[in-house]
């Protein structure tokens, strides 16, 4: 593996094709990975039009993993990238199969995990946006329960008064159940159940990764390690939302394994981590997140990689401009990473575009993967498909 000096060397050959492997780790998202390909295709074409470069996508030739290939012409140089989505949406779907009662029990357990451990009070000292997002599903689900109980008890009382108390009780319970079912059926609009499942998945073991997720992360590590043996210039890992803290642990395991079994790889591709819209403190503040805290401290001091963390104050779902290592309290004396930068939505989007998106909180959480009509230093498509490594692109830049 290589450090910053080799990044400069790799980016020096103007006459050759720059090659990159990209591994994208989604957050807690149950959708098929084709969504990310279509998002990349659509937004990449728009960013290319705005910036005046060329971007071309085509399917991956081999089977066994999901991704696509990108060819780019930027600043007079040609680059080729192979993007692979590291899929764990099946695990997400499985964790979302609880019914209405199970979700409310989950709500109680999750609330206690954060309240009982004191993590909630420490999180409240950071940015307010993510805490509003965290409390949102709890408040909405409790309001839904209240509405169901009020309607159910009202109709039950009326029915019992006209007929018999037992009939009224059954009618009230039926109405309350029906109301809750209607709310759950339309959750794709308000996302209360989805967000509750998201926070509960991280909190179910006090911040420790469930066994099925650990097994999948080990598989991801092997795929990334294999890419480091290929003839490419850079291996770039992109972790979005909760995928960011998975990436931290995966790369920590990879570097430890490499040091233990083969020693530093001087001739390997540049290794880089781009964390986007991270929510690391939501997990790292929990008492059993010992593995994550250890990995944050370890990775922050390594010279085998470049780690850039990009967030934006306009993203209410992320801990914007909060250094995930420092706020967790595990920064070592020789800390190097991450380089914390702002995507500055209010500046990199035109006033018209910003006004249109600023209330679409969930959409803004994905803006890092989209086009900007007034781009500054951050261009997702130049980073993932362009002819410059992440280390060279941000060399010498100070944190936001």
Image (spheres, rainbow, N blue to C red):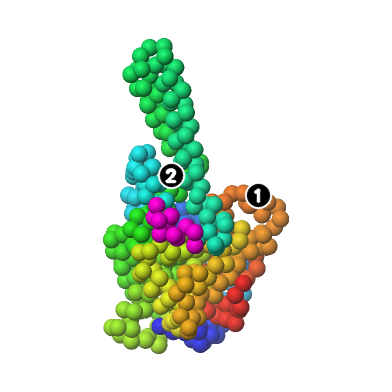
Does the image show residue 180? yes
**Secondary structure at numbered mark 1:** helix
Residues 133 and 151: in front is 151
Quarter of image, res 15: bottom right
Does the image show residue 43? no
In the rendered image of this protein, does residue 260 appear above or below residue 350?
below
Residues 238 and 247: in front is 247
Could you tell me residue 316's position as x and y percent? Answer: 57, 56
Closer to the chain start, of discs 1 and 2, is 2
Asked if the magenta segment contains residue 39, the reply would be no
Q: Is 250 placed left or right of 147 in the picture?
A: left
Q: Residue furthest right?
A: 351
Which range of residues does the magenta coloring cover? 112-122
Q: Residue at x 46, y 64 (%)?
A: 280
Q: Is 186 placed left or right of 208 in the picture?
A: right
Could you tell me residue 224's position as x and y percent? Answer: 37, 72
User: CA separation, marks 1 and 2?
Assistant: 26 Å
Report the disc number at residue 193. Answer: 2
* Label 1 sits on residue: 356
Q: Residue at x 63, y 52 (%)?
A: 358
**Secondary structure at numbered mark 2:** helix
């Amino acid at each position: 593996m290589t450090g910053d000096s080799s990044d400069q060397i790799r980016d020096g050959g103007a006459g050759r094709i720059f090659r990159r492997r990209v591994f994208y780790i989604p957050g807690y998202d149950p959708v098929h990975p084709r969504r990310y390909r279509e998002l990349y295709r659509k937004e990449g074409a728009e960013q290319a039009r705005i910036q005046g470069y060329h971007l071309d996508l085509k399917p991956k030739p081999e089977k066994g993993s999901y991704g696509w290939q990108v060819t780019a012409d930027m600043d007079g140089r040609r680059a080729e990238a192979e993007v692979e989505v590291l899929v764990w949406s099946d695990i997400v779907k499985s964790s979302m199969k609880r019914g209405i009662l199970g979700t409310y029990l989950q709500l109680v357990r999750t609330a206690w995990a954060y309240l009982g451990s004191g993590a909630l009070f420490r999180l409240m000292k950071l940015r307010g946006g993510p805490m509003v997002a965290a409390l949102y599903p709890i408040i909405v689900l409790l309001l839904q329960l209240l509405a169901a109980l009020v309607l159910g008890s009202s109709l039950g009382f009326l029915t019992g008064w006209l007929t018999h108390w037992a009939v009224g009780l059954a009618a009230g319970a039926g109405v309350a159940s029906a109301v809750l079912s209607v709310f759950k059926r339309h959750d794709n609009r308000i996302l209360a159940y989805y967000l509750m499942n998201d926070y509960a998945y991280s909190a179910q073991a006090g911040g420790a990764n469930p066994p099925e997720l650990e097994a999948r992360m080990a598989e991801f590590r092997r795929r990334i390690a294999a890419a480091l043996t290929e003839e490419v210039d850079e291996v770039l890992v992109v972790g979005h939302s909760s995928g960011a803290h998975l990436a931290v642990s995966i790369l920590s395991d990879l570097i430890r394994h490499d040091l233990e079994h083969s020693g530093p790889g001087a001739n390997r591709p540049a290794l880089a981590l781009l964390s986007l819209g991270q929510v690391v403190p939501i997990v790292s503040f929990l008492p059993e997140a010992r593995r994550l805290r250890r990995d944050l401290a370890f990775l922050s001091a390594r010279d085998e990689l470049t780690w850039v963390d990009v967030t934006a104050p306009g993203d209410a779902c992320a801990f914007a401009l909060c250094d995930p290592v420092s706020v967790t309290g595990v920064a070592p004396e020789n800390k190097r990473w991450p380089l914390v930068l702002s995507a500055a939505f209010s500046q990199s989007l035109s006033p018209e575009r910003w006004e249109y998106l600023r209330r679409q909180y969930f959409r803004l959480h994905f803006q890092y993967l989209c086009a900007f009509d007034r781009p500054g230093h951050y261009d997702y498509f130049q980073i993932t498909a362009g002819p410059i490594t992440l280390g060279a692109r941000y060399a010498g830049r100070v944190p936001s």
